[in-house]
Image: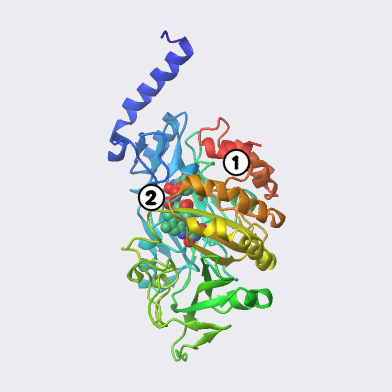
């Protein structure tokens, strides 16, 4: 087939850029069929750039018409995908503590599992962690990844400053102190504003924690005690299979001080203390999980559910999560419970958590204290995608927001209607990326689609 001039220029431009950039490409670009961590999503390009300096990032950004940043590949949908080029900052592994500012600045390749022990060694802590330490700080903040705790904001809330390479290759630094508006739009940036090269996080003094697991808590207890139950520890998670109107496990993670009474109360709102270590998914090996049974340890070895050097969760799985206003948490649980017999056959486990409200425009907790309803599904997408619209219909009266990095089927217009600052975020995208270099199909659909 003959090529017209436009097609020729487009193709030859790619080839020129390709040869100029070949030295910045990682090994992965050679293998076909690159997937995300769980293997449920196949990326649409084999072109992965792996620069080693900010200057090289600028060079990649300037040379590509289309580009998307990639973290540790733990998202379940196409949010990190590109049909043309991806860029990984895996070589950006610097970590610098500023004791005066009480911050740590981490390169975009740094994972929580790397920075957390480093901070503990130096007497510091982050306020919270996700269920696993394997993910990058940059990727987690970009999608408003969260842990749990009535008074804990998501993992993007301690961001004090961020450095981004914009579409034109310019390096921009935004800080909470100096740039309030653009900063609030950029931190949960969904990868759309550019390539984050480093992030500064606020620190607090190191602390120790312990976790205790309780078994079989009736949902009836949540009707009048939801806040109390989620507030009974620093970070609390409830797990369920949706059968028998009860949480199968309650994980209570508490801060401990020297001299605290470490006796374990045997009962918790009618649930009984576990006498052996548990995995949230009944038949999975508990050795993958962080220590339980009330044994004290560093904050970073208790806040995540899973240990760094072990497979988190199930491995071969799908995930979905919805954020509802916390005060409607119990009603939302009852609404989803009606679907239990559609859900349970395809489910590994559901988890409920709470997160504090924040002021980051595209955060799933923007100006809303949240409770989340999370699903770890078996790898049965054909069946799961039939169940998701049913769950979304049940949660519609609660203006549920789906997790940006997980699987959902909600119409874009519905997602957009829950974000008051969407017009401002779109304006920021236009300012940082006027030609849509970082706009992939996920952003096109969910931020601009109907
Ligand atoms: C087993 C498992 C457990 C999980 N547990 C939790 C949990 O407890 N809580 C929770 O909220 N989520 C959880 N998640 C979801 C996970 O936290 C998110 O998918 C998170 O975004 C993953 O980070 P990542 O580094 O893998 O980013 P990726 O998936 O690689 O990318 C995610 C987004 O970040 C952007 N991005 C990455 N790096 C940069 C950069 N340098 N500059 C600009 N943008 C960038 C990408 O473009 C993309 O939009 C879990 C996922 C798995 C697989």
Q: Specify few, some or many for label 2: CA neighbours under 10 Å numbering under 14, 14-19, or 20 or more.
A: some
Q: Nearer the viewer, residue 208 or 28?
A: 28
Viewer-closest of 308 and 336 = 336
The correct choice, above or below, for 96 with respect to 441 in the image is below
- The answer to whether 425 appears left or right of 163 in the picture is right
How far across and down, in percent of the image, does residue 236 sit? Answer: 53, 73
- The mark that comes first in sequence, 2 or 1, is 2
Q: Quadrant of the N terminus?
A: top left
Q: Looking at this view, is 55 or 89 the one in front? A: 89
Specify the quadrant of the image occupied by residue 342.
bottom right
Q: Regarding mark 2 in the picture, which secondary structure is present there?
A: loop
Image point (55%, 49%), residue name: 404
Q: Which mark is residue 446?
A: 1
Vertical comparison of 75 with 442: above or below:
below
* Residue labelled 2 has its Cβ within 8 Å of some atom of ligand 1: yes
The residue carrying mark 1 has its beta carbon less than 8 Å from ligand 1: no
> CA–CA distance between discs 2 and 1?
22 Å
Residue 177 against residue 304 in the figure, above or below: above
| Residue located beneath label 2 in the image | 37
**Marking on residue 202:** none
Residue 163 rendering spot, x and y as whole percentages: 48, 48
Residue 225, above or below 360: below
Bin the neighbour count of mark 1 within 10 Å (Cα to Cα): few under 14, some 14-19, many 20 and up: some
Quarter holding the C terminus is: top right
Does any portion of residue 127 appear in the rendered image?
A: yes
x and y, in percent, of residue 308 in the image: 34, 64
Q: Residue furthest top?
A: 2
Query: For numbered disc 1, what is the local secondary structure?
Result: helix
Q: Residue at x 58, y 61 (%)?
A: 340
Is residue 376 in sight in this rendering? Answer: no
- In percent of width and height, residue 388 lies at 57, 50
């Amino acid at each position: 087939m003959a090529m017209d001039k436009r097609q020729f220029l487009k193709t030859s431009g790619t080839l020129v850029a390709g040869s100029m950039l070949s030295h910045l490409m990682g090994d992965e670009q050679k293998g076909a069929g690159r997937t995300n961590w769980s293997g449920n999503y196949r990326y649409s390009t084999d072109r992965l750039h792996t620069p080693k300096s900010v200057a090289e990032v600028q060079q990649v950004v300037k040379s590509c018409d289309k580009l998307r940043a990639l973290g540790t590949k733990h998202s379940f949908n196409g949010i990190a995908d590109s049909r043309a080029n991806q860029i990984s900052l895996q070589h950006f592994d610097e970590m610098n503590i500023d004791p005066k500012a009480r911050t740590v600045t981490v390169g975009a390749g740094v994972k929580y599992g790397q920075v957390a022990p480093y901070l503990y060694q130096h007497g510091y802590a982050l306020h919270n962690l996700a269920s696993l330490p394997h993910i990058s700080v940059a990727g987690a903040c970009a999608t408003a990844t969260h842990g749990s705790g009535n008074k804990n904001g998501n993992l993007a809330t301690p961001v004090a400053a961020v450095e981004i390479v914009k579409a034109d290759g310019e390096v921009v630094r935004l800080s909470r102190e100096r740039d309030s508006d653009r900063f609030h739009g950029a931190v949960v940036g969904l990868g759309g504003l550019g390539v984050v090269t480093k992030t500064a996080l606020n620190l607090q003094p190191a602390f120790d924690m312990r976790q205790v697991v309780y078994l079989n808590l009736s949902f009836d207890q949540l009707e009048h005690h939801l806040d109390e139950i989620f507030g009974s520890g620093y970070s609390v998670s409830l797990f369920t299979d949706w059968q028998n109107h009860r949480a199968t496990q309650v994980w209570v993670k508490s801060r401990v001080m020297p001299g605290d009474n470490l006796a374990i109360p045997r009962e918790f709102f009618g649930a009984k203390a576990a006498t052996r270590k548990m995995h949230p998914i009944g038949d999975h090996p508990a050795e993958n999980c962080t220590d339980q049974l009330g044994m004290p340890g560093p904050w970073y070895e208790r806040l995540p559910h899973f240990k760094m050097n072990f497979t988190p969760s199930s491995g071969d799985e799908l995930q979905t999560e919805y954020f509802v206003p916390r005060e409607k948490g119990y009603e939302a649980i009852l609404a989803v419970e009606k679907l239990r017999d559609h859900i349970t056959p395809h489910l590994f486990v559901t988890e409920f958590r709470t997160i504090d409200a924040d002021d980051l425009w595209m955060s799933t907790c923007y100006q809303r204290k949240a409770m989340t309803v999370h699903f770890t599904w078996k790898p049965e997408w054909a069946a799961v995608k039939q169940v998701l619209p049913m769950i979304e219909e049940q949660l519609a009266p609660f203006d549920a927001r789906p997790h940006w990095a997980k699987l959902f089927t909600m119409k874009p217009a519905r997602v957009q209607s829950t974000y008051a600052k969407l017009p401002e975020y779109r304006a920021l995208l236009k300012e940082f990326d006027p030609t849509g270099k970082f706009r992939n199909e996920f952003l096109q659909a969910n931020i601009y689609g109907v």
